[in-house]
Image (cartoon, rainbow, N blue to C red):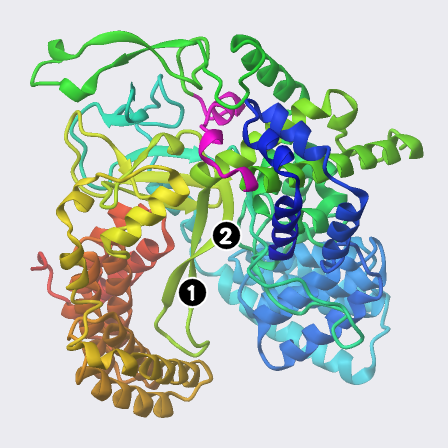
Amino acid sequence: MDEWESYLLDKWALLPKSTQLTISTAETLSDIFLHSSSLLQPKDEMFLKQLSSGYMVEKDHDAPLFYREEGNKKFQEKDYTGAAVLYSKGVSHSRPNTEDISLCYANRSAALFRLDQYEACLKDIVRADMHGLPERLQPKMMLRKAECLLNLGRPREARQAVSDLESNLAAKPSLGLSSHKILQRNLEHLKVKIQEKENLPEAFPVALAKAFEEMALEEENKQISGASLSVGLCTDPLKGRHLVATKDILPGELLLKEDAFVSVLIPGEMPPLRHGPQNRWDTRVSSGDLCCHRCLKQTLATVPCGGCSYARYCSQECMQQAWEHYHGTECSLGALLRTLGVFCHVALRATLLARFEDVDRVVRMLCDETGNKDICSPENRNLVKTVNYTNLGESEENGKIGETPIPGCNVSGKYESNYNAVFNLLPHTEKHSPEYKFVCAISVAALCRQLRADSWQAQTRGLKSSEPKALTPGLCADLTVWGAAMLRHVLQLQCNAQAITSLRHTGSKESVVTDSRQVRLATGIFPVVSLLNHSCSPNTSVSFTGTVAAVRAARQIRKGEEILHCYGPHESRMDVAERQQKLSSQYFFDCSCPACQAETVEAAAARRWEAFCCNTCRALMQDLQQQVCVAQKLLRTSKPEQAIQQLLGCREAAESFLSAEHTVLGKIEDSLAQAYATLGDWQKSAAHAQKSLRVAEARHGPSSVEIGHELFKLAQILFNGLAVPEALNAIWKAEKILLVHCGPESDEVQELRQMKSCLLDLSFIPVGPLV
């Protein structure tokens, strides 16, 4: 939290110069941690506790009724997603085996049914029954179960569910007369539908069909875990560890597939709710309400932790694994971890995943190797034979084999995605400012003290063997060593944290054309992906499925060429001066990639997607952007006609002082396309979408992932407007680009293929290649 960081920076400023100098000149992370943690006073811990109290992470048994009633309001408004989220909040605060939790599950099953999420609905029906669903509601739930089974193409099971319901009604005729008649009518209607479904041939399972299309690595690299045979590991005095192509690589080829060693879901950008009579419970929706806190799978049917209200999972299995691996320790620390920030949380979880004994062993081993004084930058003495691909000619004989020390490799010379590799990621201790190291060290020290207090409390209580026990690493080894290891991870994360992103749909609920943007779901550590060096014009593209990162070639990569990733500052998003400043301040290097060398400050200033017609028109930009925001709000609130009038006025004003390919004009054209699509005017919508596409192409290039997303929207518009040849052409272009960047399993590629199949099935489509 900003308040905690500001508090510690003020504390640093008030320290005696001699104390600041001691911390600034400390040679090891152990010394930095010890000197800083000795300055943590009870009043500091009290202030931290006060800040943490703003987060509601414990169970409040008065909350389920409130959330259920709020969810019912959303359900009546037909906002079924919002209703499901509120019912989930109710579940998270409920005691097991109570009417509260059973009703929350039952109501959530109704919302999921309306959202066509039948598998999730079935699971909630089972959960509601397991926790003691009132008998009066059981017939309604049994009917919903039968309807789910029918919609899932399982008519035999649906018929059995109907039979069970009829037996239940005969044995316990407890319903009122009117309710009984409605139920009987729905039951008879459902039986007819089951009969019709049973006469249809069984369809090929969708999940199985999709599995056949998933792209996997042809054969795993014996030198680098999760890498293809096209990738080799090298080391260089200037570049450090890096990856190179061992052969020519085609666009779209899968190069790496790695599950995060550790990841932590970002709870969202919302500040903590200041509790009071009017806002005792939080109804806001964040990523923490929509994703599994372990595997990051998006779900509305979350399973709550039994000990807290903030941790939720996609399944009982994920919940159990999280508890065993780390959440058993984290459960009581939710508010503190939210206050200290995601870097502290990742650092804690990394050490918990390694188990404390392993952290202890690795840290002490590395300390011993460097004379017990350099935990900051240990050197692993393992040797690995690597090919020097930088000087490869046409023949393999030109490759030089040599023994090169590469930190992070095991005794066999393989670089694996494990704690050893994580520990060997550079923390750049000497490059961080003294005050930043102080803030991090104090935060880790506060966390360590709370862990030790929790361990003592658990030991004092004497938990029974049958109860779930939290991990208590503070009792089994030296907290100083463990604290220094966590401090190392916090410092590593500034340069090595990977943002795990997901494509999130945006726009109005009524829009039939999907708009989307990349949102940050979590922060993770990927040891193998971290080997990729930066370029402002990279030759790879990274996409995520849950916690798994897939790295694909974004263009052709020649044998011997370095494989490069963008750390954020991309040539299409920032000018050279801004990129250089960001890379230097966050990653501690001056970028000399071809894009930075070729681009001058004058060239960056003249980029047409940011250019003005003259300097005097800059003052008009703020007013124009506000008007565009007003128009977009009208579109979101189902007022497309008013939005169109506002946007047309904005476009007329923009054209008078902005270049034709300015990003603001692109935003206006995109919004117009959305508005006309909402009205069903597909021809006008497509015309504006094409103009927006031209602006995006000027900025990002014709083969970028951004163009793939824009073409996807255009394909949807043309598909809905039955402009068949044009739609097929847009689908072909979009699929070609998105396959390269996202792979065949991405949702957009799957939807493009469904649209293409539907169009090609139409009898009047000529068979032949598209031009």
Task: Give coordinates of residue 455: x percent, y percent.
Answer: 82, 32
| Disc 1 target residue | 505
User: Distance of mark 2 from mark 1, alpha carbons?
Assistant: 14 Å
Q: Is residue 419 magenta?
A: yes
Classify mark 1: helix, strand or loop. Answer: strand
Task: In the rendered structure, find residue 521 and report the number of the disc placed on it.
Answer: 2
Image location of residue 91, percent across then percent down: 74, 59
Q: Residue at x 37, y 75 (%)?
A: 512
Residues in magenta, as a range: 416-435
Indicate the amino acid at tag 2.
Answer: Leu
Q: Are marks 2 and 1 in contact (CB under 8 Å)?
A: no
Query: Which residue is at the front of the view, 249 or 440?
Result: 440
Name the image quarter holding residue 660. bottom left
Q: Quadrant of the N terminus?
A: bottom right
* Disc on the earlier residue, 2 or 1: 1
Comparing 722 with 252, the one in front is 252
